[in-house]
Image: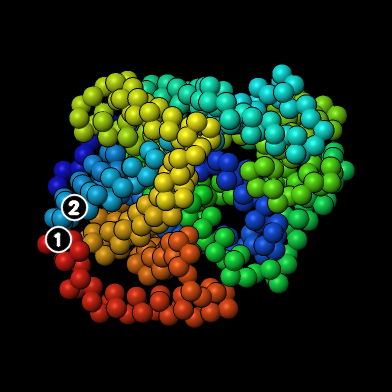
Amino acid sequence: MTREKPKNLWLSRWGFILAATGSAVGLGNIWKFPYITGEYGGGAFVLMYLACILAIGIPVMMTEIAIGRRGRGSPIDAIGRVVRENNGNPLWKAVGGMAMLAGFMILCFYVVVAGWAFAYTWKMLDGSLAATSVEALGGVFEAHNANPWQLGGWSVLVALLTLWIVAKGVQKGIENAVRWMMPGLALMLIVLVGYAFTSGSFQAGFDFLFHFDASKITGDALLAALGHAFFTLSLASGAILTYGSYIPDGQSIARTTFLVAICDTCVALLAGLAIFPIIFANGMSPGAGPGLIFMSLPLAFQQMPFGTVFGVLFFAMVSIAALTSAISMIEASVAYLNEKHGISRLKSAVLAGVVLLLISLLAMLSFNLLAGWTPLGKNFFDWLDYLTSRWMMPLGGIFMVLLAGYVLRGDIMRDELNLPPLGYALWLFMVRYVSPVLIMVVFLHALGWLLFDPVEQWYWIAGAIGLLAVAGEVLRPRVMPVLAGR
């Protein structure tokens, strides 16, 4: 089969690394990862998380990039072309469709969350966050969400900025944007860490993050590490697969993937070093979740010298992190309209933007005018989150590794990954036997269906991996043609 000629390519290797890191770095890196690191044993959790990245994050990310580059297109088109090369069942394209839909649905509520960060950058400047308690700032946050014009205005701003960048194309739009946004984010983060160093509680923040406490390695800790390792790299959302389709031939997928994972983890840890010393210096709780950013930190900044300046810097950093993630979530849909249907990039962005604004409007109204509309116990915003994070992304990840490990011919992935024999064998073992089991654990836990403690009863996971390995080797010659549709 003749390889699809690439229509768009990154100008350099760092174009993809910065774009993929921007996709991975979001609000979860700023508040969730640092907190769960400190909560679950500091250095012990970091080691456990890195092991989960090696077991889930890196193998699945390598898989998505390889399929994207092989198929050269949106998730639907790329998977379709690779399956066609494999003489397989075209129904496998549905995996790409689910990933693309998941990314778009996430963006429909993510623009609301990103809008909070943009709004708070302005609120730090105009004095709207002048308050004397966390409770008072909680009232500011609730009042912001209760005003549909205010909440909607900032959400629309995020959507329009996202669409404007994507409409300009891969090189002139996305790559040019991340070339200044990601270094800018890193610089602001380093400045904030330096600022936190002067807070007087830097050691307390450092100990919270890195003190090695093996006693906190529990089932909950492992599940937190597994879940974050899967979700942090934007897997199964169409973003990485689409970005992978723009990587030039000959570029090392393995080396690039490791760099993205390292950059993502470093940003999360630096965010912790920037946030927690300030929180501890002001006697606040580190476990406030999203409230840490929008309630506790604004109060802390007000109580510190030059706090307004650094508060603006902090929320500008969070806004950039949110915007780079938003760009990646809509790129797959725009690429699909542009490549599959021949619609110009600008018109594709406009069409996707119209749908995005209509659906995100319902997500935004979930906090005010439609707050009372809760079908089956959840509002529209929560349903988008629930369907994507609990169902679509884990299932998409499982199907992706099954496609790579059991359906595609070995030469397809071997040629694309271009790994030494031992490296390829290790990748294949992970995507066939380890990653599917661990993603299934994430899936069952997210739904509340996990019936065992994965640390105390680790033998269930080990047994499942062993059983899958034996069954896979015995049944694979018969199962693979069926799965492939041959």
User: What residue would you read off at disc 2?
Assistant: 91
Residue 167 appears in the picture as rendered: yes
Q: How far apart are marks 2 and 1 (CA)?
A: 9 Å
- Mark 1: amino acid: Gly
Task: Look at the picture and state if 211 lies above or below 346.
Answer: below
- For image coordinates 26% across by 30% down, the residue present is 337
Is residue 182 visible to the viewer in this orientation of the structure?
no
Q: Where is residue 46 in the image (x, y as percent from the top left)?
A: 63, 59
Residue at image coords 54%, 64%? 223
**Front position in the image: 383 or 3:** 383
In terms of depth relative to the viewer, which is nearer, 179 or 455? 455
Q: Which of marks 2 and 1 is in front?
A: 2
For mark 1, give the secondary structure.
loop
Q: In which quarter of the image is the C terminus?
A: bottom left
Residue that appears at 25% across and 43% down: 76
Q: Give the image location of residue 25, x and y in percent.
A: 54, 42
Instruction: Look at mark 1 in the image and give the residue it sits on.
Output: 485
- How many neighbours does mark 2 have within 10 angstroms: few (below 14), some (14-19), or many (20 or more)? few
The type of residue carrying mark 2 is Leu
Nearest the camera: 61 or 379?
A: 379
Residue at image coords 49%, 39%: 372
x and y percentages locating residue 284 in the rendered image: 80, 46
Tag 2–tag 1 contact (CB < 8 Å): yes
Q: Is mark 2 on a helix, strand or loop?
A: helix
